[in-house]
């Protein structure tokens, strides 16, 4: 097998020129200096860093093999978590119905409420559930209520957006027919929009 220098007839061949090598070295040195400055400024407690493998070994040692004596407590907390998620989602589904009607362009009362509700839906979805939980734990204290409200706030954004988009896609003909007969806004929503969904 022939080398590259033998193939191309050049003994001084290299992948990068001297200026490219110098630029790459300068970038690497700059990155190393920035990393060193960052490590120095965040005040890392190095004793914890060196101790972390032993802590991880202790954690995995307590996790495996599983201890069946704690099974009752684990199942109780697991059922509580499922109940919290179910209750929060059910409440959010009910609360997101009026929000979805205001967030849909064809059922909103005016453009101001449409914009306001859509901003609220986007902000509700963009904030993580853990952040909502931190906020509501500070308001209500640690407990089931804070967890339910945190999941509920996040779910209202998702369910409201999905329902609002579904309402916008309905067939307009039944709505126009009921409006032409002089039906009230409530009757139009009940008979032309709710029945379509």
Image (tube, rainbow, N blue to C red):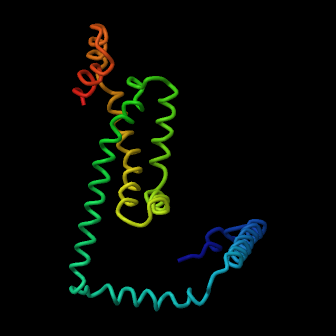
In the foreground, 32 or 183? 183
User: Which quadrant holds residue 177?
Assistant: top left
Residue beneath the point at 48% across and 43% down = 122
Where 99 falls versus 66 (above or below)?
A: above
In the image, is 110 to the left or to the right of 26?
left
Outermost front residue: 140
The quarter of the rendered structure image containing the C terminus is top left
In the foreground, 35 or 121? 121
In the foreground, 37 or 101? 101
Where 44 falls versus 181 (above or below)?
A: below
Residue beneath the point at 23% across and 67% down = 79
In the foreground, 175 or 92? 92
User: Which quadrant holds residue 20?
Assistant: bottom right
Task: Report how many numbered discs are placed on residues in the image.
Answer: 0
User: Which quadrant holds residue 102?
Assistant: top left
Q: Position of residue 116 (x, y in %)?
A: 51, 34
Q: Position of residue 174 (x, y in %)?
A: 26, 16
Q: Position of residue 32 (x, y in %)?
A: 70, 75
Q: Position of residue 38 (x, y in %)?
A: 69, 73
Outermost top residue: 181
Residue beneath the point at 45% across and 88% down = 55
Residue beneath the point at 31% across and 47% down = 91
In the image, is 70 to the left or to the right of 161?
left
In the image, is 51 to the left or to the right of 154?
right
């Amino acid at each position: 097998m022939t080398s590259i220098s033998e193939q191309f007839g050049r003994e001084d061949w290299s992948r990068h020129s001297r200026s490219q090598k110098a630029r790459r070295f300068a970038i690497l040195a700059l990155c190393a200096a920035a990393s060193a400055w960052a490590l120095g400024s965040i005040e890392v407690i190095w004793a914890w860093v060196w101790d972390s493998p032993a802590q991880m070994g202790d954690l995995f040692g307590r996790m495996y093999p599983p201890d069946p004596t704690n099974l009752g407590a684990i199942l109780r907390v697991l059922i509580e978590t499922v109940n919290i998620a179910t209750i929060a989602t059910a409440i959010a589904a009910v609360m997101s119905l009026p929000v979805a009607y205001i967030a849909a362009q064809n059922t909103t009362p005016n453009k101001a409420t449409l914009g306001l509700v859509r901003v609220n839906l986007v902000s509700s979805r963009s904030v993580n559930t853990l952040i909502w939980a931190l906020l509501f734990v500070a308001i209500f204290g640690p407990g089931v209520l804070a967890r339910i409200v945190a999941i509920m706030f996040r779910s209202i954004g998702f369910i409201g957006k999905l329902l609002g988009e579904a309402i916008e896609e309905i067939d307009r003909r039944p709505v126009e027919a009921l409006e032409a007969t002089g039906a009230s806004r409530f009757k139009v929503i009940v008979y032309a929009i709710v029945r379509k969904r």
